[in-house]
Amino acid sequence: MLKKSVALFSLALVAVVAVGCGKSNKPSDMGELGGCVVKVTQDGAPLAGAEVIFHAQDPANQKYTPSGTTNEKGEAQIKTYGFEGVPAGEYKVTVTKLVIEEGELVVAEDGSESVEGGSEYQAVDAEYRDVNTTPLSIVVTDPMTEVPTFDVGSAVNQEMDGAM
């Protein structure tokens, strides 16, 4: 009888943990989400590893911020609060890409090691990173029938404060 009780308790605990770790339902105030994939290029070439953020122009859509990260083809699946898709509406689009270059390992005479050099910088011009200056925008409809492409101009090397 004790073995059966322990087994049932263990099974119930596994079920509770599995449900608790699973993705919850979409918040009811989020509205319907339409699938949205965008492509980001820099000087016409796909820009991998860039963060794309949609900034809602409609106050009703401003509670949740849709975003995605570009893959090696420059494409980003935009998600809202972890759910694939974006509420229909008009958005300003910002793009950032932080590049971190590691420095050189230097060994001192006493055997101690340190890293010299290295840097971190933005590869996308500030104009495209700021919601107040970005010329990029999109009107999301459901369904999206095209994959819009956003070109962020030439690569830049704008160092970040507190570089390595």
Image (tube, grey):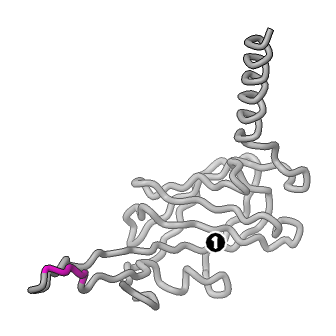
Residue farthest toward the bottom in the current orientation of the protein:
161
What is the three-letter code of the residue carrying label 1? Val
The image quadrant of residue 148 is bottom right
The furthest residue to the left: 109
Magenta segment main secondary structure? strand
Over which residues does the magenta segment extend?
A: 111-115
Q: Is residue 127 left or right of residue 91?
A: left
Q: Which residue is mark 1?
A: 93
Q: Residue at x 48, y 75 (%)?
A: 152
Q: How far across and how far down the image is residue 18, in percent?
A: 71, 33
Left/right of residue 42 with respect to residue 31 in the rendered view: left
The C terminus sits in image quarter: bottom left
Does dot 1 land on a helix, a strand or a loop?
A: strand
Q: Nearer the viewer, residue 136 or 9?
A: 9
Query: In the image, what residue occupies the spot 44% across and 87% down?
Result: 160
State the image coordinates of residue 102 (x, y, percent, origin top left): 29, 75
Foreground residue, 97 or 13? 13
Q: Picture coordinates of residue 59 (x, y %)?
A: 87, 72
Residue 62 image offset from top left, x and y in percent:
81, 69
Q: Is residue 98 above or below residue 65?
A: below
The correct choice, above or below, for 111 with respect to 78 in the image is below
